[in-house]
Image (spheres, rainbow, N blue to C red):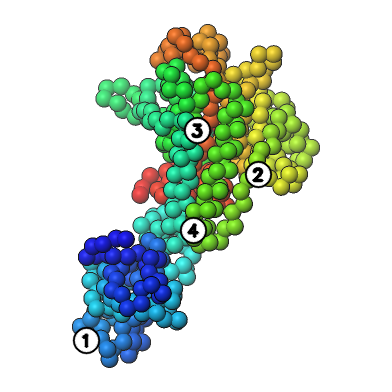
Amino acid sequence: MLLNELRTHYTDQINPDNFEGKTVTIAGWVYEVRDLGGICFVVVRDREGKAQVTLVKKKTDVELFNAARRLVRESVVSVTGNVKASDKAPNGFEIIPSRINLLNEADSPLPMDTTGKVEAELDTRLDSRFIDLRKPGTNAIFRIRHEVLKNVRKYLSEINFIETSTPKVVATATEGGTSLFPITYFTTEAFLNQSPQLFKQILMSGGMDRVFEIGPIFRAEEHDTRRHLNEATSIDIESSFCDHFDVMEILENMISNVYSSVKQNSQKQLDELGIDLEIPEKPFLKLKYEEAIDIVNQNSEEDLVWGDDLGTSAEHIVGNDVFERTGQSHYFIIDWPTEIKPFYAMPYENNPEISKSFDLMHRTMELASGAQRIHHHTILRERIESQGLNSDSFDFYLDAFRFGMPPHAGWGIGCERLLMTMLGAENIRDVVLFPRDRRRLSP
Ligand code: ATP
Ligand code: MG
């Protein structure tokens, strides 16, 4: 229980059965004032819900009554009063106040409505995120995000992973390419890291054995889609003495665990969003890349050949096909052509055209990419060169492979995509507090 002058209880801690006649202090925002002349209702909203404060004119001090009816919506107040059971009030109780402390008056008009009566455009909501977050539905999304990350940490810690943090300001591109944000680092150029990949591999050489990181990744790609951000949160793991199948199993167990914990611990928020969460069934289907290509070609006008990447529409075709056949939204695409995967993906010994790589897919989009990694220094150097990169600039990374690098595997999953597919959000920006995209740099 909270105990101080401004607040003793959240609104959802109060109930008519145990609190009848007791004095409580709640604190929050004025959601609504209904002044009916002889009686005035003030609904106060806090993070956990709402409570009705009732003032009957005849029984209330004049100053208190007048202060209540003059309250401006969304002002911040602390209200002390006695709890009284009431069938008509929301949650079955009302508070008869002895004190209303106006802590900060809100300006009016508000930049947007908080009652849910007027639907605002996403852009308007993001411009006024501080107001948007006061809506229970928006609040629910970020409470669930917390539950997701809490469970990711718990699950990975339980199976011996160590949480790490690696630099976001780096000298070299993780995978080459142009999708980097350059920054000025004193007198030289540096970049914002697009992935913790190289660093988490170095940690394998360092004997850390199993590591995970939850951190920002930056991609300077100029996409304008519902599933791409320019700053995203990646959940990454790397594990020694493992192959790609071992880390796929960790990934599907983690997904299943996260869904279960959200269903168990965030029911109030799921109800708020009107979501009946289905826990994905294990094991997830493992579809070979070549099978995925066939599915696309059989079910569409597309004419993909071996070696092509899967675009958005191809991803949808395969996702729908798998869903129709198995009823499952999650599946793996495995055994990708080595050429279209990053240089660190391990080729099969007996068929080096194909790599020990995988993507975890959701019906509508890619969720994660992973692979067993190359752990031999010379092969890795060759792979870097063959992708047109200068291997000398990777010496800080390659050195770790020369002096005892164990075999290892890992993956990275986008936290926002995990959350967005779980909640059925239409736009990834819905599940990010302050999204960064081509057109949005503020707030
Ligand atoms: P896509 O092909 O969908 O653009 P990717 O293959 O470029 O994704 P990876 O480099 O494999 O992405 O990154 C691993 C995971 O990180 C992705 O599966 C995705 O969940 C997440 N991710 C990567 N880029 C973005 C982005 N721009 N916005 C949001 N999430 C991203
Ligand atoms: Mg990928």
Q: Is residue 182 visible?
A: no
Q: Is residue 422 visible?
A: yes
Give the alpha-carbon distance from disc 4 to disc 2, as whole Å: 23 Å
- Residues tagged 3 and 1 counted as in contact (Cβ below 8 A): no
SS state under label 3: loop
Could you tell me which residue is drawn at 45 percent across and 39 percent down? 153
The residue that disc 3 covers is 159
The N terminus lies in quadrant: bottom left
Amino acid type shown at disc 2: Glu
* Nearer to us: label 3 or label 1: 3
Which mark, by number, is residue 281? 2
* Nearer to us: label 2 or label 3: 3
Could you tell me which residue is drawn at 37 percent across and 22 percent down? 171
Give the alpha-carbon distance from disc 4 to disc 1, as whole Å: 39 Å
The residue that disc 4 covers is 269
Mark before the other along the chain sequence, 2 or 3:
3
* Nearer to us: label 4 or label 2: 2
Residue 210 drawn above or below residue 155: above
SS state under label 2: loop
